[in-house]
Image: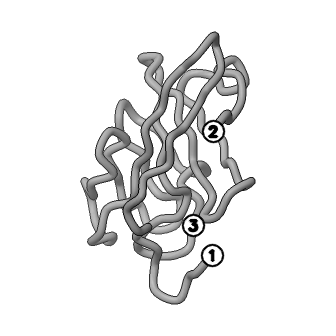
């Protein structure tokens, strides 16, 4: 699935892609890597694209849970479950994502 040109996301920034459900967060690290995760913290309903990117981690803006951008693993609570990751490729300067077939780890009470 085509997302957008890589040039649309500055290094160290993220965007929310909500043309699908659940929405995606696309991260462009300072090192030039690009990652795609479900854009909902597994602890409570918050956009990870609104969080703070530090290296290969994102910190949720609501309760400071941290997730590894490479694996979706929780690196700091209060979240206990990771977030789903998706495969990213860059083709001719455009970001493309292949969606995971795993079930998303949405917080309690959140459905899409």
x then y, percent, for residue 31: 42, 17
Say which of marks 2 and 3 sits in front.
2
Residue under label 2: 1
Q: CA distance from mark 2 to mark 3?
A: 24 Å
56 vs 35, nearest the viewer = 35
Residue pointed to by mark 1: 112
How many numbered marks appear?
Answer: 3
Q: Residue at x 65, y 20 (%)?
A: 94
> Which circle's residue, 3 or 1, is located before the other in the chain?
3
Instruction: Find the distance from the CA under tag 2 to the CA under tag 1.
Output: 19 Å
> Looking at the image, is mark 2 or mark 1 nearer the viewer?
2
Residue at point 57%, 67% (across, down):
46
Among all residues in the image, which is located at the extreme top? 92
User: Height in image: 66 above or below 15?
Assistant: below
Point out which mark residue 46 bears: 3
Q: Quadrant of the N terminus?
A: top right
Answer few, some or many: residues within 10 Å of disc 3's Cα (few below 14, many 20 plus, some between 14 and 19).
Answer: some
Query: As rendered, which of 46 and 73 lies closer to the eye?
Result: 73
Instruction: Locate the C terminus by quadrant.
Output: bottom right
Q: Position of residue 43 (x, y in %)?
A: 41, 74
- Counting from the top left corner in percent of width and height, residue 33 is at 44, 22
As drawn, is 78 to the left or to the right of 85? left
Label 2 close to label 3 by CB (< 8 Å): no
Of the residues under marks 2 and 1, which one precedes in the sequence?
2
Q: Position of residue 86 (x, y in %)?
A: 44, 45
What residue sits 32% from the left and 71% below the top? 78
What residue appears at the point 61 percent right and 27 percent down from the top-left corner?
A: 95
Asked which secondary structure carries label 3, the reply is loop
């Amino acid at each position: 699935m085509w997302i957008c040109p890589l040039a649309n996301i500055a290094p160290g920034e993220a965007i929310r892609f909500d043309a699908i459900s659940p929405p995606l967060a696309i991260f462009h690290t300072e090192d030039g890597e690009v990652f795609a995760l479900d854009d909902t913290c597994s602890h409570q309903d918050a956009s990870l694209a609104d969080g703070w990117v530090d290296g290969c981690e994102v910190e949720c803006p609501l309760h400071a849970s941290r997730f590894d951008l490479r694996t979706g693993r929780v690196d700091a609570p209060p979240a206990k479950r990771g977030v789903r990751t998706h495969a990213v490729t860059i083709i001719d300067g455009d970001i493309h994502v292949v969606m995971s077939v795993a079930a998303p780890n949405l917080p309690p009470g959140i459905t899409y």
